[in-house]
Image (cartoon, rainbow, N blue to C red):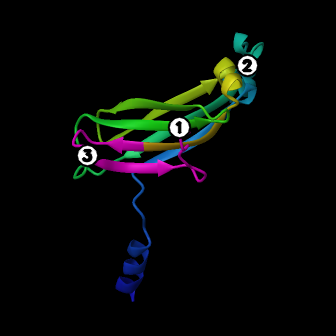
Amino acid sequence: MRKLLLLLVLAGCSHQYLNVDREYVDRGSLASTFVGSPDPAQKNPPDGVRLWMHYMLPPMIFEKDSILTLHVIYKNFEEEKISYPVPRATGWAMFPLLDDEFKRTGGLLTWRADIEAPSGKILATWKHQMWFQIIPRD
């Protein structure tokens, strides 16, 4: 019975090697808001969003000099690709969209992150639930 239960638990596990979390940034994200310490940023607090990309690749698939590429589509439908080095199998990267740039673009609409090996193989992908590609008009 234990073997069957273990088999069912392991069969239901998915391997998500890359995860992207969105964090809203405002006065409430300042440490001084919670501890009541003096902070010049309280007069003009940040406004926007950050994407935190966390990855944990198994050593058997990790390739040195891999690249994490973040594809973002802003609410004004501009697109941007940002690349980060992946120096080791486990790590993180952060993409800030704050203040003037946040206001200019209207914020983030959707995003996708890929870790690509130097060989061209995609090692991990994470997509926002509403990810789409813009079809160019020619």
Q: Residue at x 27, y 42 (%)?
A: 117
Q: Earlier in the sequence, mark 2 or mark 3?
A: 2
Q: Which residue is at a point 64% across and 32% down the rendered structure image?
A: 49
Residue nearer the viewer, 47 or 138 = 138
Is residue 129 depicted above or below 108 in this figure? Answer: below
Given the current orientation, which residue lies at the most extreme top position?
40
Q: Which mark is residue 62?
A: 3
> What amino acid does circle 2 point to?
Pro
- Amino acid tagged 1: Asp
Q: Position of residue 47 (x, y in %)?
A: 71, 25
Q: Position of residue 80 (x, y in %)?
A: 51, 31
Residue 22 seen: yes
Q: Earlier in the sequence, mark 1 or mark 3?
A: 3
Q: Nearer the viewer, residue 59 or 72?
A: 72
Which residue lies under the disc numbered 1?
138
- Please, what is the dominant secondary structure of the magenta stretch? loop
Region in magenta:
114-138
| In this picture, residue 114 sits left or right of residue 122 | right
